[in-house]
Image: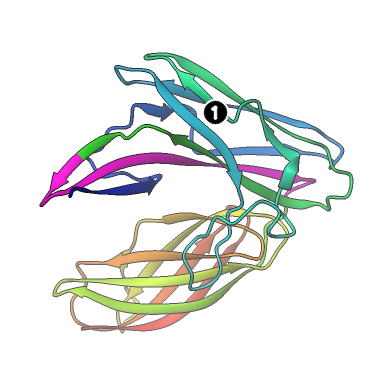
């Protein structure tokens, strides 16, 4: 008897999977409005690049990221800054013809009860038909794809949020590579796309290395884990500075790092 396993992948797909449906205008849609009495409209551009018609399913979920936990997608209205039922799409499902470009439209209803700050939700666009079938040892795997499009609304003048370093963990990955995991929390009312980098200094105060920025979104009251690869640094003890840059403020933390 042949068993069927369904594999559903979020956002990033292995190279052997080629989705017939693609999103043309990005997976993050930001809106800034002066007051909560303002209605928002937006468009997600969807294209069927495949050789046959494809059906998409469209639904909404919240996105939350607690400290030391993976991102979760609970039902809408699960937290105080969810857009809730105010975020609506023009369709719940649709068949897109081959090579067709389709404008998936959404609206966010005005809500005078919302306080200044960032509100967000996720629109899921799921390709209903399998992308590719693989057979290994009698197990058939149908690969599906779904896109999580973040819809973010900033109400009022955006303020740089205060950030806090919740945890810093050093892990040895291989003989010549380590990783520094930095857990940051957003303690403000506004979200911030944050760059985190590491500066490494020797015992004489000479800067040896500055890592490339690792960029993630930090939502109000939520955490994100920034992973900083550490390579080409000889064994030894170093003084380091972790820098979190929100484009409005810089948040630094000094640490001592033992490279083994």
Q: How many marks?
A: 1
Classify residue 184 as left or right of residue 172: right
Nearer to us in this view, 39 or 256:
39
Neighbor class of circle 1 (other Cα within 10 Å; few <14, some 14-19, many 20+) is: some
Classify residue 241 as left or right of residue 81: left
Residue 37, position in %: x, y? 87, 38
Residue 90, position in %: x, y? 65, 25
Q: Which residue is mark 1?
A: 93
Residue 231: tell me if it is visible.
yes
Residue found at the far front of this picture: 1
Q: Residue at the spot x=66%, y=51% of the render?
A: 76
Nearer to us in this view, 119 or 147:
147
Residue 170, position in %: x, y? 34, 79
Element type at mark 1: strand
Vertical placement of residue 201 versus 156, above or below: below
Which residues lie in the magenta part?
134-158
Residue 16: tell me if it is visible.
no
Residue 43, position in %: x, y? 60, 26
Q: Residue at the spot x=46%, y=66% of the render?
A: 225
Vertical placement of residue 1 versus 79, above or below: above
Nearer to us in this view, 184 or 94:
94
The quarter of the image holding the C terminus is bottom left
Nearer to us in this view, 29 or 18:
18
Q: Residue at the spot x=68%, y=57% of the render?
A: 160
Classify residue 31 as left or right of residue 57: right
Please identify the dominant SS of the magenta region. Answer: strand
């Amino acid at each position: 008897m042949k068993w069927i396993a369904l594999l559903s992948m979020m956002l990033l797909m292995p190279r052997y999977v080629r989705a017939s449906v693609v999103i043309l205008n990005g997976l993050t849609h930001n809106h800034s409005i002066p007051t909560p009495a303002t209605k928002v409209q937006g468009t997600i551009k969807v294209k069927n690049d495949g050789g046959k018609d494809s059906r998409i399913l469209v639904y909404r979920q919240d996105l939350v990221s607690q400290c030391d936990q993976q991102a979760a997608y609970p039902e809408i209205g699960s937290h105080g800054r969810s857009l809730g039922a105010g975020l609506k799409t023009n369709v719940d499902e649709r068949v897109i013809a081959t090579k067709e470009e389709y404008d998936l439209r959404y609206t966010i209803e005005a809500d005078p009860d919302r306080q200044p700050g960032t509100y967000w939700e996720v629109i899921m666009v799921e390709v209903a038909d399998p992308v590719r079938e693989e057979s290994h040892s009698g197990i058939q795997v149908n690969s599906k794809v779904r896109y999580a499009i973040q819809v973010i609304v900033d109400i009022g003048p955006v303020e740089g949020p205060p950030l806090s370093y919740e945890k810093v963990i050093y892990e040895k990955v291989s003989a010549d590579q380590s990783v520094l995991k930095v857990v940051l929390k957003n303690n403000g009312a506004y979200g911030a796309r944050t760059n985190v980098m590491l500066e490494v200094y020797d015992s004489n105060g000479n800067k040896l290395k500055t890592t490339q920025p690792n960029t993630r979104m930090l939502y109000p009251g939520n955490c994100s884990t920034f992973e900083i690869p550490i390579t080409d640094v000889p064994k030894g003890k170093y003084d380091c500075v972790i820098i979190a840059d929100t484009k409005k403020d810089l948040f630094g933390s000094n640490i001592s790092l033992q490279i083994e």
